[in-house]
Image (cartoon, helix red, strand yellow):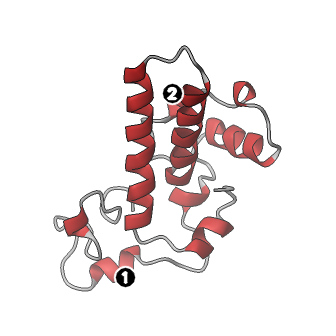
């Protein structure tokens, strides 16, 4: 999913990466399912993702969550977790008056890119809600 179905370019919307598919294979492989796919649930994708999801569920403060700076480069492991991590990174950067403008701009751009990727990609609201991530 993370390599072929996620549509980072608007031209790929509804078709996915053209190098991965021909014909109706995009619909067969990428369209949302009733049960969330593992790239969204992130079971067995590493303890850090489980710790992040549990921390979100129990509303832990940012400092008690896994470091979003280390997670933001890993959307291929856990897509919705990476979206949440990017949003947390942005919130931490924006909430600190000492954050350099370049860091804040970078945090904003990264969060925006992942959220837009999520909205452009074939993932349903049901799949997001069933995944266990509280977006």
What percent of the width, then of the height, locates residue 65?
Answer: 70, 31
Name the image quarter holding residue 17: bottom left
What percent of the width, then of the height, locates residue 100?
Answer: 44, 16
- Up/down of 96 relative to 57, above or below: above
Residue at 83% x, 44% y is 58
Residue underneath mark 2: 70
Q: Quadrant of the N terminus?
A: bottom left
Going by the image, does 87 lie left or right of 131? left
What percent of the width, then of the height, locates residue 76?
Answer: 42, 48
Residue at 43% x, 64% y is 119
Is residue 75 among the parts visible in the rendering? Answer: no
Residue underneath mark 1: 28
Q: Quadrant of the C terminus?
A: bottom right
Q: Residues within 10 Å of mark 2 (few under 14, many from 20)?
A: few
What percent of the width, then of the height, locates residue 27?
Answer: 34, 82
Residue projecting furthest to the front? 97
Front residue of this view, candidates 62 and 98: 98
Is residue 13 among the parts visible in the rendering? Answer: yes
- Up/down of 50 relative to 97, above or below: below
Going by the image, does 125 lie left or right of 134? left
Residue at 61% x, 27% y is 95
């Amino acid at each position: 999913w993370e390599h072929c179905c996620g549509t980072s370019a608007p031209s790929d919307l509804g078709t996915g990466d053209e190098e991965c598919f021909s014909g109706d294979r995009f619909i067969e492989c990428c369209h949302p399912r009733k049960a969330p796919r593992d790239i969204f649930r992130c079971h067995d994708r590493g303890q850090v993702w489980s710790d992040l999801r549990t921390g979100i569920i129990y509303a832990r403060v940012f400092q008690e969550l896994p470091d979003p700076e280390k997670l933001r480069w890993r959307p291929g492991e856990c897509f919705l977790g990476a979206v949440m991590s990017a949003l947390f990174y942005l919130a931490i950067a924006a909430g600190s008056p000492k954050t350099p403008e370049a860091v804040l701009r970078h945090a904003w751009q990264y969060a925006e890119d992942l959220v837009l990727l999520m909205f452009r990609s074939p993932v349903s609201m049901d799949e997001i809600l069933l995944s266990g991530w509280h977006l």
